[in-house]
Image (cartoon, rainbow, N blue to C red):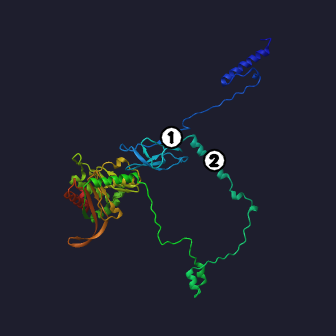
């Protein structure tokens, strides 16, 4: 080794190069490349599933009895950004509308359905891209905003010499041709000049036909409206419907409400109306006429009586009429029932009712009087057996102790299934309601 120091050095260099090549995963260098310097590069890659996460939004579980619905609205398109918990779509079922919200922020990458499609629970609706795609969109938006704020206005960068001189002002006078009738008159009488300048010639571009334009439009029957139509027709075809009417004096109930509404609003936070009082009166009346609160099944040949009173309250919404339920009215006072009615009515108008809010109900209360109705014969909410109807309060002349007086009066009605409820029972129910409303203190005894 002492005789050949250069050979020993080359062997050491070869060994080092081979080791470096094996570490780098490259082919071993040839002897001709041993004298060249060896440069090694290294790269580091980081892989995270969070930065490339794709989230698939599916049809949510709506209720035990609902397995499908119609996609009524798709609020986002491919490429649009959505925030966490922002509404993506609306699914319409037979009774309610269900909102589908984004589980997290992202960009809509793919849409699997179209508006009007029937979708089932668990079906894919939308795919969201989060992580890198979302960060890239945010960075691009920030860059565009920065460039827009730093670039000078285009108009300000133009030199003054390029501006063209303004054209010289010239006087232009336009003479309009007078109408034919005016020409005939001007042959014998001269019209003032000011009147000539203000009048305009009639337009001859549109030919008058003497007919009004008429149009019509069609829209697809919504799922809710289809269900309403089906159920009302079923009620009409199944029930032996009959309506009986009564009229009552609202003087005492209106005075009671005026006396206590501010106190109740301050102490309990409830805006006192008339629905709570009528619902309580109907509850007490139904306890005295049990068949109002019952149901009939002719196929099974049974009548079902209930010791609890759950009342369906008719609420009008932009999508249709819904009947959420106020439960256990027999255990509640007027103010508690009023609070519950206000709560479910707000949920209905906001489109936030659940199937649990709509299920059940022993009989219904409808109040078309808020729209000005004087009298009505409502349809039974089958399979219930009765619906109680309130109407508008109108002043009328009535005989009080043999003397005419003007009193605030209301017509009330009960449509009932005559297969189960006899006329005597229907009249008795309305008379009980009348007694409680005209003497509200009676309701405080129960």
Q: Quick check: can you spot residue 323?
A: no
Q: Position of residue 259 (x, y in %)?
A: 31, 63
Q: Quadrant of the C terminus?
A: bottom left
Give the numbered dot on residue 345: none
Question: In which quarter of the view is residue 345 placed?
Answer: bottom left
Q: Position of residue 438 (x, y in %)?
A: 25, 63
Look at mark 1 in the image and give the residue it sits on. Answer: 55
Q: Position of residue 431 (x, y in %)?
A: 22, 60
Residue drawn at x 24%, y 73% is 404
Question: In which quarter of the view is residue 66 placed?
Answer: top left
In the depicted view, which residue is nearer to us: 2 or 222?
222
- Using residue 106 as the reference point, say whether residue 100 is left or right of it: left
Secondary structure beneath dot 1 equals strand
Give the numbered dot on residue 143: 2
Q: Quick check: can you spot residue 282?
A: yes
Q: Mark 1 or mark 2, which has the lower sequence index?
A: 1
Residue drawn at x 32%, y 52% is 231
- Using residue 306 as the reference point, say whether residue 177 is left or right of it: right
Residue drawn at x 58%, y 85% is 186
Residue drawn at x 68%, y 53% is 151
In the depicted view, which residue is nearer to us: 398 or 75?
75
Image mark count: 2
Q: Position of residue 99 (x, y in %)?
A: 44, 48
Q: Quadrant of the N terminus?
A: top right
- Using residue 216 as the reference point, say whether residue 204 is left or right of it: right
- Using residue 402 as the reference point, say whether residue 192 is left or right of it: right
């Amino acid at each position: 080794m002492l005789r050949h120091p250069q050979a020993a050095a080359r062997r050491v260099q070869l060994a080092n190069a081979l080791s470096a090549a094996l570490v780098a995963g490259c082919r071993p260098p040839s002897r001709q490349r041993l004298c060249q310097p060896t440069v090694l590069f290294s790269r580091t890659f980081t892989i995270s599933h969070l930065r490339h996460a794709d989230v698939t939004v599916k049809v949510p579980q709506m209720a035990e009895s609902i397995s499908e619905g119609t996609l009524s609205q798709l609020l986002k398109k491919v490429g649009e950004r959505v925030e966490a918990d922002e509404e993506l779509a609306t699914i319409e079922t037979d009774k309610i509308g269900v909102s589908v919200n984004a589980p997290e922020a992202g960009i809509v990458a793919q849409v699997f359905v179209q508006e009007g499609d029937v979708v089932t629970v668990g079906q894919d609706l939308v795919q969201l891209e989060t992580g890198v795609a979302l960060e890239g969109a945010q960075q691009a938006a920030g860059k565009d905003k920065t460039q827009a704020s730093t670039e000078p206005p285009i108009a300000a960068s133009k030199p003054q010499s390029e501006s063209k001189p303004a054209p010289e002002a010239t006087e232009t006078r336009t003479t309009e041709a007078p109408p034919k009738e005016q020409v005939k008159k001007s042959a014998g009488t001269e019209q003032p000049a000011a009147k000539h300048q203000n009048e305009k010639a009639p337009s001859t571009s549109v030919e008058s036909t003497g007919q009004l334009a008429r149009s019509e439009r069609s829209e697809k029957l919504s799922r809710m409206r289809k269900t309403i139509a089906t159920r009302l027709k079923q009620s009409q075809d199944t029930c032996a419907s009959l309506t009986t009417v009564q009229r009552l004096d609202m003087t005492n109930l209106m005075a009671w409400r005026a006396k206590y509404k501010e106190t109740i609003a301050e102490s309990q936070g409830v805006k006192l109306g008339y629905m709570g009082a009528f619902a309580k009166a109907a509850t007490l009346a139904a306890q005295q006429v049990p068949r109002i609160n019952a149901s009939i099944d002719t196929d099974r040949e049974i009548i079902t009586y209930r010791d609890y009173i759950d009342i369906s309250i008719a609420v009008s919404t932009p999508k249709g009429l819904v009947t959420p339920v106020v439960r256990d009215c027999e255990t509640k006072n007027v103010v508690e029932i009023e609070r519950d009615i206000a709560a479910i009515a707000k949920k209905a108008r906001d489109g936030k009712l659940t199937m649990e809010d709509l299920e059940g109900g022993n009989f219904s209360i409808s109040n078309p009087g808020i729209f000005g109705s004087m009298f009505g014969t409502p349809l039974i909410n089958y399979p219930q057996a009765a619906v109680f109807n309130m109407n508008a309060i109108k002043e009328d002349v009535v005989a009080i102790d043999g003397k005419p007086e003007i009193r605030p009066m209301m017509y009330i009605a009960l449509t009932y299934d005559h297969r189960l409820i006899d006329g005597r029972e229907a009249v008795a129910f309305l008379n009980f309601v009348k007694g409680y409303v005209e003497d509200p203190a009676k309701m405080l005894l129960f």
